[in-house]
Amino acid sequence: MEFVVFLAAYMVRRKLDNSGLMATDTFWRKSFSHAQSVAPGREASLARGLVIIAVPTLLLVVGEILLRDAGWSFAIHPVAFVLLFVLMGTPGLGGMLDLYIDAWRKGDMQSAWHQVCDFLPPADRGTASSPEQMHQALSRTVIGMIFERYFVIAFWYVVAGMGGAFAARALIALRDHWPHAAARTGFGRLVNGLNYLPSRLLGLTFGIAGDLAGWLKSGRSVVFSLSGNAWQTLMEVANSSLTGYELEPERFSSLHPQDWPDFGDRSLAAVRGLMNRSMLVWICALALLVIAGIV
C-alpha cells in the first residue's frame, strides 16, 4: 500500500507543480519566523531549530507505530498521502524556466539572468558572470532542487516512514529559511549528511536512465567518491549520463554554434528528462521491493 500511496501523491504533486499551486516555502518561513529573536552570540545555534522540527517528527513516528500496533494501518495511508504531496513539489519552477528559455533563445542574457537570479543560491549569484556560468549554476540548482523536493523525500519515506520524510524536508527548510544565516550553514552540513545516501543512489540511477557508457567512463568514480556536495556530485554524474554536451555550454557552443540559441531549451529538457526517467526507475524499484515483501 505504501507504493500506491507514494505513486498517488507523486502524480497529484506533479499536477499541482504544473499549475504552480501549493508552494510551501511561505509556510516554512512563517513556521520559523518566531525564532528571529535570540540572545547575542547564539545566532549560530542549531538547537532551537532542531527542537522545532523534532516535535512533529516524534508525533508522526509515535502515531504511526501506535496505529500499526493497534491494527489500524489503513488509517496511516490517507495521512501519508496528504503529507507526501505537501512535502514534495517544485511549484512555479516550470513557468520560470520557460521564461528563461525564451530569453535565452532571443539572446537576451540580461533578461534570462533576471528570471533566475533569485532562484539561484547566493553563492552562485556572484560566480554567474557569463551565460555559460549562469546556465551551469541554473542546471545544478534545478537538479539539486528536484532531488531534494522529490528523491530525498521518497528515499526517507521508504526508509523511515512519515517521520523520516517530514524530518528530511524540514531540515532542508531550516537550511533555506531559518532566520539566522549563521545557523543556516550548520543546517546545511546536516543536510549534506542527510543527502549522502540518496544522492549516491540517484547517481547510480543516472547510469540506468541515461548514457551508461558515459556514466561508466566518468560518472561511476564520482558516485563512489566519499567526498563532495550532493548537488555538485549529481551535476557531474548527470553530465556524464547525457550524450549531447547539454551541461557543457562552452563545448556545445564550439561544436554547434548554429544551435546556440536553442541550447537553453535543449539543456533543460535533457535535465528534466533524465530526472523524470530516474524517478520512473525508482518507482519500478519500489514496486519490486513491495512484490518481494521487503517494503
Image: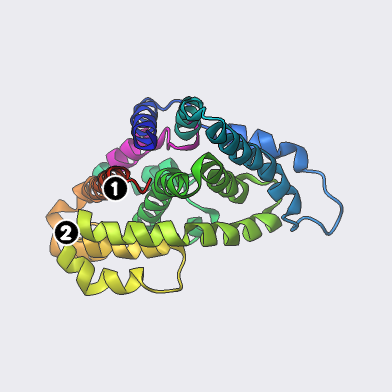
Which residue in the structure is indicated by mark 2? 244
Q: Residues within 10 Å of mark 2 (few under 14, many from 20)?
A: few
What span is colored magenta in the figure?
Answer: 86-103
Residue 256 quadrant:
bottom left
Q: Earlier in the sequence, mark 1 or mark 2?
A: 2
Residue 41 position, x and y percent, is 83, 59
Question: Residue 150: which quarter of the image?
Answer: top left
x, y percent for residue 275: 29, 48
In the foreground, 192 or 81: 81
Q: Residues within 10 Å of mark 1 (few under 14, many from 20)?
A: few
User: In the rendered image, which quarter is residue 251 located in?
Assistant: bottom left
Above or below, comparing residue 271 to residue 89 in the picture: below
Element at label 2: loop
Q: Locate the C terminus by quadrant.
A: top left
Disc 1 secondary structure class: loop
Report the number of numbered marks.
2
Residue at 74% from the left image edge and 58% from the top image edge: 44
**Among all residues in the image, which is located at the extreme right?**
39
Amino acid beneath label 2? Gly
Residue 247 visible in the picture: no
- Dot in front, 1 or 2: 1
Where is residue 291? Give x, y as percent.
27, 43
| Residue 120 drawn at (x, y percent) | 47, 50
Asked if one can make out residue 11 in the rendered structure from this viewpoint, the answer is yes
97 with respect to 194 (left or right): left
User: Can you tell which mark lies on residue 243?
Assistant: none
Q: Quadrant of the N terminus?
A: top left
| Looking at the image, residue 286 lies above or below residue 47 | above
Q: Amino acid at mark 1?
A: Ala
Instruction: Let me know if residue 95 is in the magenta part.
Output: yes
Task: Say which residue label 1 marks.
Answer: 292
Q: Dominant secondary structure of the magenta stretch?
A: helix
